[in-house]
Image: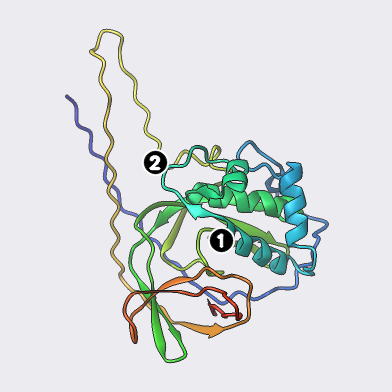
Amino acid sequence: PVKATIRFRAANRVHTDTFKDDGSTFPMSGLPADITPYLAPTEQVPSSNPQIVQKARELTANDRSAFQACQSVLAWVVEHMQYVLVPESYDGMYSFRSGKGNCQNFSHLAAALLRAVGIPVRIVNGITLDRPFTLGVEGREYEMEMAQGRHSWIEVYFPRSGWTPFDPQQSEFFVSNRYIRIEVGVDNNESVNDGLVRWKQTRSADRQSPRLEENVSANFVNDRVQFNGVRTPYRMRKLLLSVTAGEAGPVIAQREKRDDVPTTAT
């Protein structure tokens, strides 16, 4: 047996800033030539499918800016989808019809809906870190934590702000400094080089099934995070945060007979 070990370290500096509606018009027009490929449909991002187009137009019918349209689509994706670790398929059409999938499905479905109404989207592959941070809301503190490992999310292009990251799997409209971007592409079929391991076996050798183990760890040299939350009337019902002060256990904001207003970060 042959054991090969590869180790590397990467230094990463991330700055998180407030993002507000920059007024990019919707529908968009006059996009640069290097941006238009991220409008095209692919096998995993079926933005030209009539069902996807109809739904995307329905979701964004009342929106007047690209950011509003992005919010409308992402809010619907969070409501529509249920997380499944190993789905039957990873494409956006499967996600649309079944309402199930993992991070790739969330990203492909969101990208398909946004591209269907002329908003460029690219798929991001990278790593999330499990170091939690707190969100202060009206005297309480809520803890937010991702799983550590590989993850997929999206970047949306706004003409006035450029590429801006969002995570369609999460119920907040920002990506924290716990996300480390490694690779981007039109879909996950294109962005597959990160972590790709190839091997060859000679014909005379005994058949073996190579095993691969990957360990990801992170050491924060400096970590200063301050998020404040405000309650806003919004149509997103799903919000899962852990209370670190006050009550114990998870809190889910749900809309029942009255309109509960979930918390969003600013």
Near mark 2 (Cα within 10 A), the count class, few <14, some 14-19 or many ≥20, is few
Outermost residue, front side? 257
Labels in figure, total: 2
* Residue for badge 2: 195
Q: Is mark 2 on a helix, strand or loop?
A: loop
Q: Which residue is found at the position 40% from the left and 54% from the top? A: 127
Q: In this view, does 50 lie to the left or right of 203?
A: right
- Residue type indicated by callout 2: Gly
**Position of 253 relative to 206 (above/below):** below
Q: Is mark 1 on a helix, strand or loop?
A: helix
Q: Is residue 9 left or right of residue 93?
A: left
Q: Nearer the viewer, residue 211 or 191?
A: 211
Look at the image and tell me in which quarter the C terminus lies: bottom right
Residue 63: % across, % down: 77, 68
The tag on residue 78 is: 1
CA separation, marks 1 and 2?
28 Å
Q: Which residue is found at the position 26% from the left and 32% from the top? A: 211
Near mark 1 (Cα within 10 A), the count class, few <14, some 14-19 or many ≥20, is many
Which quarter of the figure has residue 214?
A: top left
Which quarter of the figure has residue 75?
A: bottom right
**Position of 2 relative to 229 (above/below):** above
Look at the image and tell me in which quarter the N terminus lies: top left
- Residue type indicated by callout 1: Val
Q: Nearer the viewer, mark 1 or mark 2?
A: 1
